[in-house]
Image (cartoon, grey):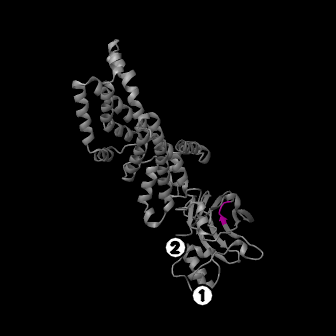
C-alpha cells in the first residue's frame, strides 16, 4: 500500500504540470534560454532558509506598469520623461543579480536614457547615461564594468576608499565606513525611520514625441520555488514533474515488453523442446554474453537517439535474458506434472496446453520480476543520460543529473540540483521494491514464510 501510494502521489503530482506551467510546449520552453531570463540563476529551494536561519531574498520583478510617470516636458518635437519605480527590500541577504531591460520604439534617433538608483538613505547612484545602441538594451548591473565602476566610485565617496573588487551588492549595503567593505550588511527598506523604499529613476529624452520606451527591472533572489533552479535559470521542479512520468513510462514499457517476451519464449522453448529449445537457448546465451552497455553507447554516439528510440534499442537488446532461462526451468517442471498429461490425453493441442496450462503458472513469477525490473530501466536511463547519451532535448530525471554533473553542482555545492532528481529516482525505486516483496508472496504462495 505504501509503494502504490508513493507511485500514485508522483503520478498525480505530475498531472499538475499544465497548472504549474501553463506553457503549451513544455519541452520547447525548457530548451529556450530566453524563457528563463527572469528566473534567478542557481537559486536554492525556498524552504532552505529554514536551515539557514535568515530570510533569503526572492525575485523582485518591476514591470513597466510599476514605473510611474513623475514628470513630462515637451519642447518642440522633443519629449523629456521621468519615470520612477519603488520597491521594498526586507531580506537578510543580498540579491544574486540585478538586470534592467529597456525596450524602445523610435522613428529616427534612439532616445537618451539615464538610469539612477536611489537608496532608502537618500543616496543616489547613476548606473547608466547615454543613447541606446539598439531598440532592445539590457543593463547587466552585476557584470557591466562601466556600471560597476560607477558603483565603486560611490563606495569610495561613502566609505573613504574603493572596494577591493567591484560588486553591485554595495547598492544594497549599509554605510558603515570600512566595515561596509569588509563585512557589508543589508540596508533594508524598513531600517530607516520612517521606512523608505528603494527607487529606480529612468529619465528619457525622446527626439520625437511619438517615440516610446518600456522598462523592466529584475532584482534576482537566492531562493526559488520548491526545488530551486539550475545554471540556465530553469525551474528544477518543472523538470522533475515532467521527467517523472517520462522515466516511469520508460521503465514500465521496457519492463513489460522484455519480461513478458522472455517468460513466453522460455516457456515455449521448454514445451516444444528439440530444435526449438536448442535455438532459443543458444540465442539466449548469445544475448547474455553481449556487451550490452558498450553496444548501447556506440549506437547512441552514432545516431544520437531520442529517449523512445533509445527504449526500442534497449528492448531489442533485452528480448532474451535470465528470465528466459528461469521460465524454461519452471516450464520443464510444470510439463512433467500429471494434469498436463491429463490435458494431452483428452486431446488438447500443444498450443492450448502452452497458453492455458503452462503460461498461467509462469506468469505470476514474470509479474513479480516485472515490478522489480522497472527501477532497473529507470536507472539505465539515468546512467545513459549521465554519460551524455540520453535524449538531447527532453527533460528527464537522468537528464537533470547529467546537467548537474556538467554544471559542476557537486563541486560548487549546489546540492538541490543533484539530491532532488536523485531523490525522486530513489523514491520510485523504493516504491517498486515495497510492491515487489508482498506481490511475490501473493503470486508465488510456495515462497510464503511460515
Could you tell me which quadrant the N terminus lies in? top right
Vertical arrangement, residue 142 with respect to residue 317, above or below = below
Residue 89 rendering spot, x and y as whole percentages? 67, 69
Q: Residue at x 58, y 63 (%)?
A: 48
Q: Residue at x 36, y 37 (%)?
A: 315
Image quadrant of residue 53? bottom right
Judging depth in this view, the residue of 212 and 409 nearest the camera is 409
Q: Is residue 392 magenta?
A: no
Q: Which mark is residue 145?
A: 2
- The prevailing secondary structure element of the residues shown in magenta is strand
Judging depth in this view, the residue of 184 and 372 nearest the camera is 372
Q: Residue at x 54, y 63 (%)?
A: 133
Q: Residue furthest right?
A: 194
Mark 2 / mark 1, whichever is N-terminal: 2
Judging depth in this view, the residue of 352 and 213 nearest the camera is 352
Residue 294 rendering spot, x and y as whole percentages? 28, 47
Identify the secondary structure beneath mark 1.
loop
Vertical arrangement, residue 251 with respect to residue 271, above or below = below
Q: Residues within 10 Å of mark 1 (few under 14, many from 20)?
A: few
Q: Are marks 2 and 1 in contact (CB under 8 Å)?
A: no
Is residue 317 visible in the rendered structure shown here? no
Residue interval drawn in magenta? 204-208
Vertical arrangement, residue 417 with respect to residue 336, above or below = below
Identify the secondary structure beneath mark 2.
helix
Q: Which mark is residue 160?
A: 1
Q: Judge from the rendering whether residue 364 lies leftward or rightward of residue 75; answer left or right.
A: left
For marks 2 and 1, give the CA distance. 21 Å
Image quadrant of residue 277? top left
Amino acid at each position: 500500500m505504501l509503494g502504490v501510494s508513493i507511485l500514485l502521489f508522483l503520478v498525480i503530482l505530475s498531472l499538475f504540470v499544465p497548472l504549474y506551467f501553463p506553457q503549451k510546449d513544455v519541452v520547447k520552453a525548457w530548451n529556450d534560454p530566453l524563457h528563463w531570463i527572469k528566473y534567478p540563476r542557481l537559486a536554492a529551494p525556498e524552504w532552505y532558509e529554514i536551515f539557514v536561519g535568515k530570510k533569503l531574498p526572492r525575485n523582485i520583478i518591476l514591470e513597466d506598469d510599476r514605473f510611474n510617470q513623475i514628470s513630462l516636458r515637451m519642447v518642440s518635437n522633443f519629449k523629456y520623461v521621468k519615470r520612477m519605480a519603488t520597491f521594498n527590500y526586507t531580506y537578510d541577504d543580498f540579491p544574486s543579480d540585478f538586470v534592467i531591460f529597456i525596450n524602445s520604439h523610435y522613428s529616427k534617433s534612439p532616445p537618451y536614457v539615464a538610469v539612477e538608483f536611489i537608496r532608502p538613505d537618500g543616496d543616489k547612484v547613476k548606473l547608466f547615461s547615454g543613447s541606446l545602441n539598439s531598440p532592445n538594451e539590457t543593463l547587466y548591473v552585476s557584470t557591466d564594468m562601466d556600471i560597476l565602476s560607477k558603483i565603486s566610485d560611490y563606495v569610495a565617496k561613502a566609505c573613504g576608499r574603493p572596494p577591493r573588487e567591484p560588486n553591485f551588492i554595495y547598492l544594497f549595503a549599509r554605510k558603515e565606513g570600512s566595515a561596509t567593505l569588509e563585512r557589508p550588511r543589508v540596508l533594508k527598506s524598513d531600517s530607516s525611520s520612517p521606512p523608505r523604499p528603494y527607487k529606480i529613476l529612468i529619465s528619457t529624452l525622446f527626439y520625437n514625441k511619438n517615440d516610446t520606451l518600456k522598462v523592466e527591472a529584475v532584482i534576482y533572489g537566492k531562493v526559488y520555488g520548491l526545488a530551486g533552479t539550475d545554471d540556465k535559470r530553469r525551474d528544477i521542479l518543472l523538470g522533475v514533474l515532467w521527467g517523472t512520468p517520462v522515466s516511469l513510462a520508460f521503465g514500465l514499457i521496457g519492463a513489460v515488453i522484455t519480461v513478458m517476451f522472455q517468460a513466453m519464449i522460455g516457456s515455449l522453448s521448454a514445451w516444444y523442446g528439440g530444435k526449438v529449445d536448442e535455438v532459443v537457448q543458444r540465442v539466449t546465451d548469445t544475448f547474455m554474453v553481449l556487451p550490452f552497455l558498450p553496444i548501447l553507447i556506440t549506437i547512441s554516439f552514432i545516431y544520437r537517439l531520442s529517449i523512445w528510440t533509445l527504449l526500442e534499442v534497449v528492448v531489442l537488446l533485452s528480448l532474451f535474458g535470465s528470465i528466459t532461462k528461469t521460465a524454461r526451468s519452471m516450464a520443464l517442471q510444470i510439463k512433467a506434472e500429471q494434469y498436463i498429461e491429463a490435458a494431452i490425453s483428452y486431446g488438447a493441442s500443444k498450443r492450448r496446453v502452452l497458453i492455458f496450462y503452462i503460461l498461467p503458472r509462469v506468469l505470476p513469477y514474470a509479474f513479480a520480476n516485472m515490478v522489480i525490473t522497472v527501477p532497473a530501466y529507470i536507472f539505465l536511463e539515468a546512467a545513459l543520460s549521465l554519460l551524455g547519451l540520453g535524449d538531447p532535448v527532453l527533460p528527464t530525471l537522468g537528464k537533470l543529473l547529467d546537467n548537474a554533473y556538467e554544471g559542476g553542482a557537486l563541486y560548487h555545492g549546489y546540492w538541490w540540483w543533484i539530491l532532488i532528481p536523485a531523490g525522486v529516482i530513489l523514491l520510485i525505486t523504493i516504491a517498486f521494491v515495497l510492491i515487489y516483496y508482498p506481490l511475490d508472496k501473493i503470486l508465488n504462495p510456495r515462497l510464503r514464510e511460515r
